[in-house]
Amino acid sequence: MIELHSVNKWYGPHFQVLTNCNLNVAKGEVVVICGPSGSGKSTLIKCVNALETVGNGIIIVNGVEVTDPKTDMPKLRSRVGMVFQHFELFPHMTILENLCIGQEKVLGRSTAEAHAKANALLDRVGLTEQAKKYPGQLSGGQQQRVAIARALAMDPVAMLFDEPTSALDPEMINEVLDVMVSLAQEGMTMMVVTHEMGFARKVADRIVFMDRGEIVEIGEGDSFFTSPRTERARSFLSKIL
Ligand code: ADP
Ligand code: MG
């Protein structure tokens, strides 16, 4: 579903932020990306839906070459859901409107269709009651669940998450992780940057460990935690576990 082939990227002429990154994510697979701050995790996943351009290398999502300048980026982006640390909802629109705007403007759905889809998703994330409120009236955990529902409204082929729980108060983290766990269990293809190693152990098929712009190690599920192969991964895990 997602292929990265020899991806390199520079910020400016001298700073190489990604070095020879190779990764294939299968349909239905959940890949967690971890690594120290500044290691290039956000940059890597932003390249997948072309929020950042790569220097060289090829990225293919669902058979479409993202790195080809001829690709229709708005269309591609609409099919790859992205959820950030800060929820980035439209503040001047109600929750329901937040869930409908992309469906109507990008996918061309009728208002009735968009509402039906939005209401089903709000029910799914437990926020039916909040449909007429504005983002600022919701808690951080609720806003993040709206952000996930908004991405799902576009029928994405994959979902990208960049530290979706890092900005949340501790008591709200689980309500967001629970939604992500259920998505994973339903077979959504996911790339998740997170420090929530409990989540990683529970649902990740593979763990990608990045350091200084490189994919240093890719571990299968629990074995990454119990027996990391590289010193760099061991050292990282000793600091966060
Ligand atoms: P992570 O998500 O792992 O913390 P990032 O991908 O955000 O890492 O950043 C990787 C490195 O690239 C960091 O050193 C960061 O300072 C740098 N960086 C990120 N975005 C930019 C940018 N737009 N311009 C220049 N440097 C950047
Ligand atoms: Mg980051």
Image (cartoon, rainbow, N blue to C red):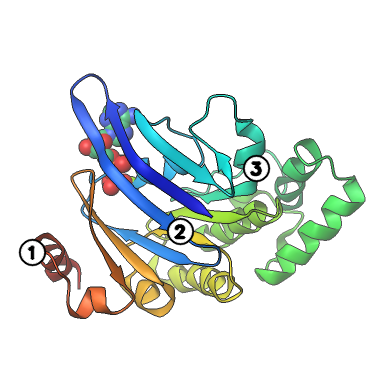
Provide the secondary structure element on which disc 2 rests. strand
* Residue lying at 42% horizontally and 30% vertically, measured from the top left: 53
* Mark 1 surroundings within 10 Å by alpha-carbon count, few (fewer than 14), some (14 through 19), many (20 or more): few
Residue behind mark 2: 25
Residue behind mark 3: 78
Q: Residue 234's quadrant in the figure?
A: bottom left
Chain-order first, disc 1 or disc 2: 2
* Residue lying at 32% horizontally and 73% vertically, measured from the top left: 220
Q: Residue 199's quadrant in the figure?
A: bottom left
Q: Is residue 160 above or below residue 129?
A: above
x and y, in percent, of residue 85 in the image: 43, 51
> Does ligand 1 reach within 8 Å of label 2's beta carbon?
no
Chain-order first, disc 3 or disc 2: 2
x and y, in percent, of residue 161 in the image: 47, 55
* Residue lying at 35% horizontally and 30% vertically, measured from the top left: 56
* Closer to viewer: mark 1 or mark 3: 1
* Residue lying at 69% horizontally and 70% vertically, measured from the top left: 124
Can see residue 161?
A: yes
